[in-house]
Image (tube, rainbow, N blue to C red):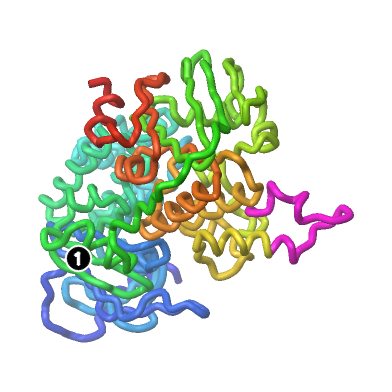
Amino acid sequence: MMQKQADAILPLKEISKSPAVLELKAVTKVFPGVKALSEVSLKLIPGEVTALVGENGAGKSTVVKILTGIYQPDDGIILVDGQPTIFPVPQAASQSGVTAIHQETVLFDELSVAENIFLGHAPRGRFGLIDLKIMNKKSCDILHSIGARIDPEQKLKDLGIANKHLVAIARALSTDARVVIMDEPTASLSHKEIEELYELVESLKSQGKAILFISHKFDEIFRIADNYTVFRDGQIIGDGAISDVTDADLVKMMVGRDVSQIFPKRKTSLGKVILQVKSYTHPTEFEDISFTLRKGEILGFYGLVGAGRSEFMQALFGITLNTFGTIKIEDKPVQIKSPADAVENGIVYVPEDRGRQGAILDLPIFQNITLPSLGKISGNGFLKLAKEFKLARDYTERLELRAASFDTHVGNLSGGNQQKVVIAKWLATQPKIIILDEPTKGVDIGSKAAVHEFMAELAEQGLAIIMVSSEIPEVLGMSDRVIVMREGRMVTELNENNLQPETLVRHAAGI
């Protein structure tokens, strides 16, 4: 029955030919209580990259699921080569040449590279058995076409992150795709690997593939896109040639506010020194880190991949042990040997990897937020649900978290909203110092603005903030001072008088 459905690529009626290989026309999708898409139209042209931009919750994921046959539109039509078409199941979209490379494609470590690439559609020989020789040969050809020097017979578990990402791309291209959807493809890649991905995109364009590119990073969009489409609240706000707009234009379309509001850092009167770190060292990760932090201050930490910033922050929070040096909080020496010690002394940590380290994805929003604060919402050994909901509501409203209800599991939220849950969880403990490690990584521009606004409010209220960020505009826009690290050591400390993009990069790169 499933195979019969998958073959059902059904022309509905004859219409004039379109230059687009894949098109949505006036597509609407409604979920209970939510209109996810409202009369959305989108064209994907062979040999061109269309950037799809919008806030988390704007409808981008719903569009991708409709294009790949996971959802079906409630109204409107899908056209392939100008012909109205139905994708009743994902196999139908795949048979029409539509493939997607997701941010976190599921691969299997114990299988070979070739087995991962052709999982579910391996070539078969006599008696219906998988033909390993042909599968390895085809895998080799696909890997070669994207510039990947990977042995197709090698186990996936023996590859690095970048090569695993190339295997995911090869898997998507193994179906002879005509339309390639890239959803945040650079999220886990280094600068060098991102450059290689750009070359791959150019190669796919030259092969006549139509590419839908979804990214929160404007430098990527302006680097590789030919066209743009902006979504807001399930509707198209604007589209056209990327050469006709600026990043400020895109921001205003996405969030309905000016770009200057994305970094709302205010001039605050810094209070007394609350944290002193002196000669803090780990045998392998970092060495001789010394600095002070004042109440109401946002202290930025900048550096390239491998600089040791996150490793130091994890040590400061008691995750990484075997460290030595001194820490004083409010001029009182403290020893932090565990996260519990850190929280007890008023230090909290919002990690970069929110999915694995920051939240319990299978628990609802309200339970994640109140988890470190159970003592505040308990009485006589019992949780008080009204207090728990109030605590969760107070902080989610301040961070403008978007969710259907507090019972929604965190794993079902967008990346930006997951980040807000993690920040809300720790702020509910009323800390003295908060460490934000890549606080807006993978977060849309509107959610960035909300997080930055909240950071500015917290600083005004006297909270001391350490912000680790790889985004230069964020570092420049939000920091009072910046410490630059390279290869596990502090190389300079910059204040507003010498805080320039070129200065940051030169120190971080050792130029």
Q: Quadrant of residue 85?
A: bottom left
The residue drawn where x is 22% and y is 38% is 195
- Pick whichever, 104 or 256, lies toward us: 256
Residue 163 position, x and y percent, is: 33, 34
The residue drawn where x is 66% and y is 25% is 332
Figure label count = 1
The residue drawn where x is 28% and y is 54% is 175
Residue 401 position, x and y percent, is: 51, 62
Q: Is residue 369 magenta?
A: yes
Q: Is residue 495 magenta?
A: no
Q: Main secondary structure of the magenta part?
A: helix
The segment highlighted magenta reads 368-389
Report which residue position mark 1 lands on. Answer: 44
Q: Quadrant of residue 135?
A: top left
Q: Is residue 489 above or below residue 395?
A: above
Residue 340 position, x and y percent, is: 69, 35
Q: Is residue 35 visible?
A: yes
